[in-house]
Image: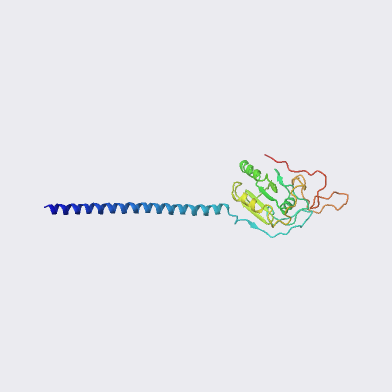
């Protein structure tokens, strides 16, 4: 009888150990499974972030052209792009700065030939977005002006490069400025972005035909050193 009790006790202990081992294996499986799921989720989140980051900051949508520099004309130019990102331009460059009225394409193109980035925007752009653009354009070699009938809300242009945006808050805009302002492909890299003209289109429109060659008339600003005469400049706005 004692042997039977001992055997029964051994069998009971064996069952308890087996149950305990099954519980431990099940717990370990659940822990490893949960850990694996967390790792999979983390990998998925990182991949999603990287893809989303690339989609929102990639400059793949920048359009390019192949205009050569130093092509001057005194008359109004019909540009292929609107706003233009290169081509013939006026001998006078536009003083870099912030303008509240449209400026002449021909003067602005000369500025981007010097390395400037020209940001244009629809005149009805909300004030908050305009304030963002003004902050970006407060740096050197930057032009900012409204542009009627613009195809996008905001367009950033440098020589032979252009990016169209639906918002001034788009993270690609500062990235474009960093990459293409004074970039090595600028035809006249390092040339001045001041000492040119600071007038708007309404104040000094570019003529459709060549101006008079009467030597008694004053010559416009060119790439030659500026004269000592004061030159009107844009009035920064807050």
Which residue: 45% across, 52% down? 42
Residue extending furthest right?
Answer: 216
Query: Residue 138's x, y, as percent?
Result: 68, 44
Q: How many marks?
A: 0
Query: Residue 60's x, y, as percent?
Result: 59, 57
State the image quarter where residue 33 is shown.
Answer: bottom left
Query: Residue 204's x, y, as percent?
Result: 77, 46
Left or right, 29 with respect to 79, comes to left
| Chosen colour scheme | rainbow
Which residue: 64% across, 57% down? 63
Which residue: 14% across, 52% down? 5
Q: Nearer the viewer, residue 153 or 141?
A: 141
Query: Residue 179's x, y, as percent?
Result: 64, 53
Residue extending furthest left?
Answer: 1
Left or right, 70 with respect to 28, comes to right
Residue extending furthest top?
Answer: 238
State the image quarter where residue 62 is shown.
Answer: bottom right
Q: Nearer the viewer, residue 56 or 151?
A: 56
Q: Quadrant of the C terminus?
A: top right
């Amino acid at each position: 009888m004692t042997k039977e009790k001992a055997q029964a006790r051994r069998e009971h202990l064996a069952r308890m150990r087996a149950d305990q081992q099954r519980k431990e294996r099940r717990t370990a499986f659940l822990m490893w499974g949960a850990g694996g799921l967390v790792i999979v989720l983390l990998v998925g989140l990182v991949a999603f972030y990287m893809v989303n980051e690339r989609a929102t900051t990639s400059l793949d949508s920048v359009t390019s052209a192949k205009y050569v520099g130093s092509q001057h004309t005194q008359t109004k130019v019909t540009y292929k792009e609107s706003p233009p990102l290169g081509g013939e331009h006026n001998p006078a460059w536009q003083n870099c700065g912030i303008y509240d009225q449209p400026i002449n394409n021909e003067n602005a193109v000369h500025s981007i030939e010097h390395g400037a980035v020209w940001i244009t925007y629809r005149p009805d752009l909300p004030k908050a977005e305009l304030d963002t653009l003004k902050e970006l354009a407060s740096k050197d070699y930057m032009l900012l002006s409204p542009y009627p009938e613009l195809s996008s809300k905001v367009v950033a242009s440098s020589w032979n490069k252009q990016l169209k945006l639906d918002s001034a808050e788009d993270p690609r805009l500062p990235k474009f400025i960093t990459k293409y302002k004074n970039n090595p492909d600028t035809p006249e890299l390092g040339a001045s972005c001041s000492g040119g003209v600071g007038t708007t289109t309404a104040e000094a429109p570019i003529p459709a035909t060549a101006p008079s060659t009467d030597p008694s008339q004053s010559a416009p600003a060119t790439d030659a050193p500026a004269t000592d005469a004061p030159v009107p400049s844009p009035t920064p706005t807050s």
